[in-house]
Structures are given as structure tokens and as C-alpha cells.
Amino acid sequence: MAQPANRPVFAPWLDPDQKPLIRFQNVTKKFGEFVAIDNLTLDIFRREFFALLGPSGCGKTTLMRMLAGFETPTDGTILLDGVDQAPIPPNRRETNMMFQSYALFPHLTVWDNIAFGLKRSDMPKEKIPARVEEMLRLTRLEKFAKRKPHQISGGQRQRVALARSLAKAPKLLLLDEPLGALDKKLRQDTQFELMDIQEKTGTTFVIVTHDQEEAMTVASRVAVMDHGKMIQVDTPGRIYETPNSVYVADFIGDVNIVEGRATRKGDDRYAISWAEGQPEILATSTEKVDQGTKVYFAIRPEKVAIARERPEGRANVVEGKVHDIAYLGNISTYKVEVAGGRMIKAQVANERRIARRDITWDDPVFLSFTDTAGVLLLH
Amino acid sequence: MNRRFSWFNATSLTLGFAFLYLPMVILVIFSFNASKLVTVWAGFSTKWYGELLGNQAFLDAAWVTLKVAVLSSTLATILGTMAAYVLVRAGRFTGRTLFSGMVYAPIVMPEVITGLAMLLLFIAIGLDRGVTTIVLAHTTFTMCFVSVVVSSRLVTFDKSLEEAALDLGCTPFDAFRSVTLPIIAPAVISGWLLAFTLSLDDLVIASFAAGPSSTTLPMKIFSSVRLGVSPEINALSTIMIGIVTVGVITASLVSKRSIARQRAEEQAAVRTT
């Protein structure tokens, strides 16, 4: 999703010959009794834009701080380019970090903030100004070089922080909730800007965020974390379309979860009985599910069609009554009450003007979806 | 202001301030007295100030006091800042509360006891009493004041600024020197000024720690008053009041204005609108 279509598919994680830039090997981090990271193993590849996604307290920030060197693993090893990072202090690591608070030095100008790391590197003195200018150009801050951080806007500060962390051309750039402080519109613009800069510089980015939309937009791969464990690591598309658990399905986007018992109906086809007297839901699953197992059928609202008449030729049709309508302008979400008081959401793009919508509150409706629209989840 | 002072408020305010400052006002007025008798006004004159400049004993004492104040407040600032930094930054370690309590305890310790303890120590280690011992004694009792001022600034200091410095290649010392110190500088300066004024007017501790050749100005004043108050003493005291007032006001201005401004800037730098 993050990759433009005109480039060959970027998927080093599928290539067994690729060496990862970062390798977490059975990393555990404990704070006293609290286990922040639980025996985690993960590879991140060069030029990736890797997103760590999860609720607060899931360990994503700890994972990032271990990469930066501010925390040391209790157990396990972290390799950067094959080098064990454990004995290397933060100031000698080939990583740089963009802080959530930006952490710009208030007593230095924008120019000096960006030059700060360069002055402490082995870069010859006379080359520093050119590099700073280059960074200012990259982040479109040329006009603000002489200003102090408190004299520029939030969006500009965010770019100074980015320029400062990119100036030393690190092997790995860590971004800790980089856009959290920006308002929504600026955030969206900045996301594209970040992707653009990542592509131009070819730096590997690891971003920590709790905003799933942000992760989906910018990342080449997303890792969904919970309680110090990786729940699923995959491309945004696969995370969304084929989540491996109810947790992931629920965390990313909107989803209907229907609980039921599965019966095998041939190859990869299953029928799920979910309510007394209701037709079974027909679904497919590539994973083998045992007869009579309790399963969760997950389907995204936009894959559920809603109609006043019983649709023909759809694998699954469920009757219900409109309980609520959320009108969001571009789309409308219908909350439909089906058998047993269960609510199923259906999302429809508003192709017609509002006056001509024909479904309203308490209308009896038919929900329908194909047998491949949803996924079967075991947990 | 449409709310006026009531008579009661005005009276208590006047009484309160009179109680506090009347003695000093009288002292300042009589320092400009032309008469040699301290209690009889005989016209305005600045001759006692002139005479003061010719009094070698007073000048020597002033020189000792200044040396002691500059040296001890500088030492106290270094030690106090270090103590504050460790106590604020080191996080929770066993005995942290005890340590911070112990740093601040000398503030409430009776000066006589501090002075006596210092004296016993100097005798025990065989250190000859003189300027050095006064400097050491003053450093001991002023560093906790510096520590209080600096640590109150450090607790509001965004730790990620230091982490950013480390991340950009600073050693921990370089991070402190090039990021933390410039930002907390107003608090450090204000701590120095506070230590300077405290050292300048200390009598009790200096008396314990001083040797025969190292009389400070407050000691000199105290001993000459026992032989009778002279207008010269009034003049000298007026100068000291002036210096201390300027010091304290500067310290509070530096801390109030520039700390507030810097904090606002720092917060602006870490947060968005």
C-alpha cells in the first residue's frame, strides 16, 4: 500500500536470501515483575517502513527504546547489520530517533539543532553547512534556519525534528509517535511527506504508533503488538484482509464478529451455525478447522451489502431490521439487528444524494455477502 | 482597582513593614549623619563613607569577605547542581528520600551547630583556620540552597532533551554540558547569587571557622560595635544592605523571569500549539 504501483514489488521479507537489517532474537524485557517484551523474535529489512502498532502499554515504545539504546534487553540479542547492539551506548549507535515530544533544543536555532549531531560525528567541519542546508531543503525549512524552536509552528517543529534525526544519515531511523501532536489534516499531509522522504533517503524507518490509519498509510509492513508479543506481522493489506486473530481484526478498522460452530463442507468450505433457526453462514478458510470447533467469523462492514429486497445469487443472506444509521458524508454505516439481538454493521458508499436514500430506521432489510468476504478465526 | 484598602489593612501593613524595616531605615539615615554621635542628627554628609575607604582594617575584612563569598558560592553552585542533578535524575534508588532529606537538612540546622561541627572537623584534621576554612564552611551550608533552586528547575526539565542529545552522539557529560546546563543556567545563576548573599552576611559560621588573619566584614562589624557604634559602621552596613538587596533582587528576577520564559520556550519546543 505504501509502495507506488510503478515499482517492482518490495517484499524482502519473502526473499530467504535477504539479510535483515535488524534482528530481534528471543528478546525479553522486564521492568521488575512486569514483562514489557515477551520472548520476541522479529526481522526488519533495509529500506522498510516498519510500523509497530498497538495500544498503549503493549511494549512498542520499549521495543523502540531498546533499538535506540535507552533500554537494554533483559534477555536475548538485538542485531543491527549483524552486530550485537548490547554493548553499544546510545551515542555510538548507527540509529537516530525522532522523539514524540520532538525534543528540540530550545536554546539553539533550527540550523544548530540540525547541525547538533553532525558536530559530534566524524564529518569534517567544512562539510557540515552543506549537509545542514541539504536537510533544510529536504524538509522545506530554508526560511526558518535562524529561528528558535518556539518561533515556529507545530508542523515546522516536527520537520526540524525529522531533519535533525536524518542529518547523520543513520542506518535506521526510529520515529516515536511522530505525528501525534499534529491535527488531523496536517497529520495526513505529513504522512505522505514522511513516505516521500523515506523513499528519497532510502533510510529504514521504524515507526511507533497507536493510530492504525497512520500505520496502514505509511508502512510497508505492520506489526500488531499486544502485551509484549507480536500478534501479527504483515503488509497493511494482509493485516486488514486476513487478520490472524479477533484481536487484530478488531484493532485494525471496523469489523463484525459472529461467533459460531464450524462444519466442514468440502475442501476449504465451511458452514457456521451461529443462531437458532437461521441459515448457516457459508465461508471459506485456508486453515483447516476441526468439525464443531468454536470459530469467529469476521467480516468488514464494507463487504456487507444491504437491500430492501432479498438479493438473488448471494451465498449468504441474513434478515434484519435497521437499528441505527451513522451518516459520515462519504459513507453510511447501517447497524442492523439480526436474530438473537446481534448487531451487524453494513457500510455503503453514498453514491446518491441524501434525499434519495431509500433505507431508514426500523426498515426490514436483507444483509448479504459472498462466501469469501469474511475470514474464519479460531481465537 | 475599585477595591480599596480598608483602614485596618492599611494599618497592619504599615505596622508590619515598619517593624521589619524601620531599624534598617534608621541605620541608613544615620549613615549620612554629619555628627559623630550616632543618635543625634546634625545634617547630611557622606564623610563617613569617605572615612570608611581610608580604614585599612575594614577594607581588609571586605576583601576577605568578597573572596570567601565568590569562592564558596562557586563551589556551592558546582556541588549543589551536581547533587540536584543526581537526586532528580537518578530515579528511585534505595535511600533516595534519605539522601534528599540529608541534602536539605542543613537549611534548618542551627548555624551554631553547623559552625561548631565545622570547627571540630578542622581541628581534627589539623587544618589551619583561615580563608580556606571559611570557604569550606560556607560552601557546606550554602550548597543545599543551590540544590533546592536547581532541583526545582530540573524536575520540570524534559528528559527526552537529554536522550535526544545522547542519541545524536553526545557522551552523558557532553549532553549535560551542551543541552542541560544552558537550559537550566538561569536557575544555576540564581542559586549562585543566593549562595553569594548568604555567604556575604554570615556571622555565626564564619566566627567558628575563621582564624586570626581572616576576619570577615560581619565579624569586623560585630566586634567593633562592642566598642561602641560609630557612624562608619552605619555607612558600612548601608553598603552591605545595598549589595545584599541587589543580589537577592537579581536572583529572584533571574529565576522568575528567565526561568519562566525559558520554560515556556522549552514547552513550546516540545509541544505544539
Image: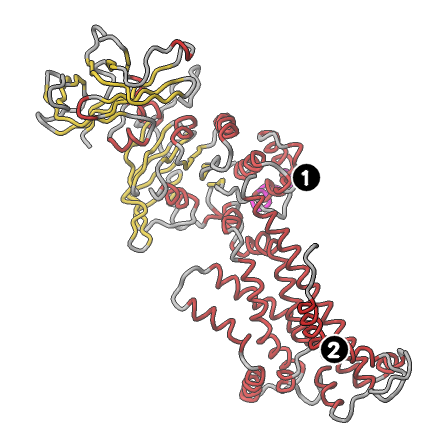
Residue A146: mark in rendering: 1
Q: Is residue A357 above or below residue B81?
A: above
Instruction: From the top left corner, tell me how far across and down residue B237 is, in percent.
Output: 77, 79
Front residue (pair A269, A23): A269
Front residue (pair B16, B41): B16
Q: Amino acid at mark 1?
A: Lys
Residue B18: mark in rendering: none
Residue B25 seen by the camera: yes
Q: Quadrant for the N terminus of chain A, please.
A: top left
Query: Mark 2 packing: few (<14 Cα in 10 Å), some, or many (20+)?
Result: few
Q: Is residue B95 above or below residue B168?
A: below
Q: Is residue A231 above or below residue B91?
A: above
User: Which residue matches tag 2?
Assistant: B22
Instruction: From the top left corner, tell me how far across and down residue A100 is, in percent.
Output: 48, 41
Left or right, A204 with reference to A267: right
Magenta extent: A118-127
Outermost residue, top side: A312
Front residue (pair A165, A333): A333
Instruction: Name which quarter of the figure residue B223 lies in.
Output: bottom right
Left or right, B271 with reference to A328: right
Q: Amino acid at mark 2?
A: Leu
Marks 2,1: beta carbons within 8 A: no
Left or right, B49 with reference to A75: right
Label 1 resides on the chain identified as A
Outermost residue, left side: A291
Front residue (pair A362, A185): A362
Which residue lies at the image location 52% right of the left edge and 53% below the top edge?
B171
Query: Mark 1 packing: few (<14 Cα in 10 Å), some, or many (20+)?
Result: few
Q: Residue A125: within the magenta?
A: yes
Instruction: From the top left corner, tell me how far across and down residue A361 is, in percent.
Output: 31, 18
